[in-house]
Image (spheres, grey):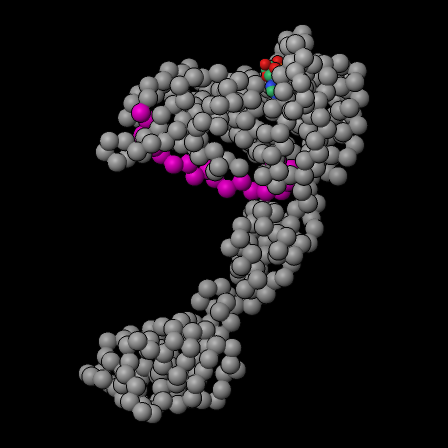
Amino acid sequence: MAQLSDDCFAFGGALMRIEDAADLIAARLPVLAGTEWVSLAEADGRVAAEDVVAGHCVPPFANSAVDGYAVRFADLACDGETRLPVRGRLPAGAAPEAVAAAGGAVRIFTGAVLPPGADTVFMQEDVRRDGDAVLLPTGLKRGANARAAGEDVARGERIIAAGRRLVPPDLALAAATGHARLPVRTRLRIALFSTGDELAEPGTPLAAGAIHDSNRVMLASLLTRLGASVHDLGILRDEPQALARRLAEAARDHDLILTSGGVSTGEEDHVRTAVETVGQLLFWRLAIKPGRPVAMGLVDGTPFVGLPGNPVAVYVTLLFVVRPLLARLGGMVLPPPKPRTVRAAFAYRKKAGRREFVRVSLATGPDGLVEAHNFPREGAGLLTSLTGSDGLAELPDDATGVTPGDALVFHPHTGLW
Ligand code: AMP
Ligand code: MG
């Protein structure tokens, strides 16, 4: 496994912008994921480990884009209908016969190899048959309805860049260019814990003062959607020794340890003490709301991330801080965000100097344009603010508020996973 340096998470600044956090991660941390070859059927959502190039061109030969008649353009009359004898028949998949187009028209079907000499195809709907001849109208351009060899992809062209998360059309392109298997990054093995004496497993009765652990199932599902292999290791009690032991164990066979809760600076925040006994811990004070400081560290050389406890802070810090970390460790190149711009239908005040993510829903305004409405309550513990919103509006660091009518950067929830 690649070695992480002790100071990989060191950061001297006061408040870190989320872009600086991502840059620091990319600069200091190695790619930990290995490479494996998988079949195309298994490759959806995986990350390409290498550039992939086309083994042959696509299409591999010039062919017809329609059902009709292939001709040599030079045989057409300039000023009226052309009558040509029909010679031969070429369905898709037939080997190119020695049927020459010159001086005649070849009956051809979509995907069939263009016969030698033919460069233009008439659609069958546009012509008239007259016995063994066909009558062709004027006005078609040279090359119409013909697909040139290699017009889609040239042989040797890069079809997939290393680091790209594969989507179904990539798999089609790989298949079309001669590949049956692709080199992909191994999934990151993530050890996931919740921490806190108040937590009970979902579905179990609640004792006084207890709540059901809701972060873990959300994190496990998000991490899985982001391509990781998640190992759910349950709830850690607020007990430094046991915590330290479990974390050290998890460090042995995982690429990343992720916890939620227990990392604020209160005296009941034992994760901090635990990590400090078995590794190093640093708090990144991120210029982000919601999101308390995020703990970054190493446990026996394995990266450790301690997220806040409040569910909305967990969600935002996972997607805007941990996601770039997962991308880096997993060898993935995160595509630049492509948020939508929508119009604010609400007023909001914020402090300058931090990025703020406001939970919003979209609706069509009176003039037919899309408007964003903020969730009526703000608490970082409100799960219904996530289930009851369409996404997050991202307010710039230097903004001091939102006025109705402002343009807002909008991230749909589903675009973040
Ligand atoms: P903490 O950072 O441990 O002080 O937790 C902050 C808040 O988040 C507290 O109200 C915790 O009860 C809550 N919390 C922590 N972990 C979880 C969890 N796994 N599921 C739901 N709520 C949690
Ligand atoms: Mg706690």
Q: Quadrant of residue 229?
A: top right
Q: Is residue 387 left or right of residue 279?
A: left
Residue 102 image position (x, y, % from top left)? 37, 89
Residue beneath the point at 67% across and 18% down: 205
Q: Nearer the viewer, residue 219 or 305?
A: 219
Name above or below for residue 253 compared with residue 247. Answer: below
Q: Is residue 344 magenta?
A: yes
Residue 176 image position (x, y, % from top left)? 54, 64
Q: Is residue 379 magenta?
A: no
Name above or below for residue 207 compared with residue 325. Answer: above
Q: Is residue 145 left or right of residue 267?
A: left
Residue 101 image position (x, y, % from top left)? 39, 87
Q: Is residue 173 left or right of residue 86?
A: right
Q: Give the residue furthest to the top.
A: 267
User: Which segment is the magenta one?
Assistant: 326-345
Residue 217 visible at all = yes
Residue beneath the point at 29% across and 74% down: 141
Residue 194 visible at all = no
Q: Give the residue furthest to the front.
A: 205
Q: Quadrant of residue 122?
A: bottom left
Q: Nearer the viewer, residue 139 or 28?
A: 139
Name above or below for residue 255 compared with residue 130. Answer: above
Quadrant in the picture for the N terminus? top right
Residue 146 image position (x, y, % from top left)? 39, 73
Residue beneath the point at 58% across and 38% down: 226
Q: Quadrant of residue 117?
A: bottom left
Residue beneath the point at 53% across and 40% down: 334
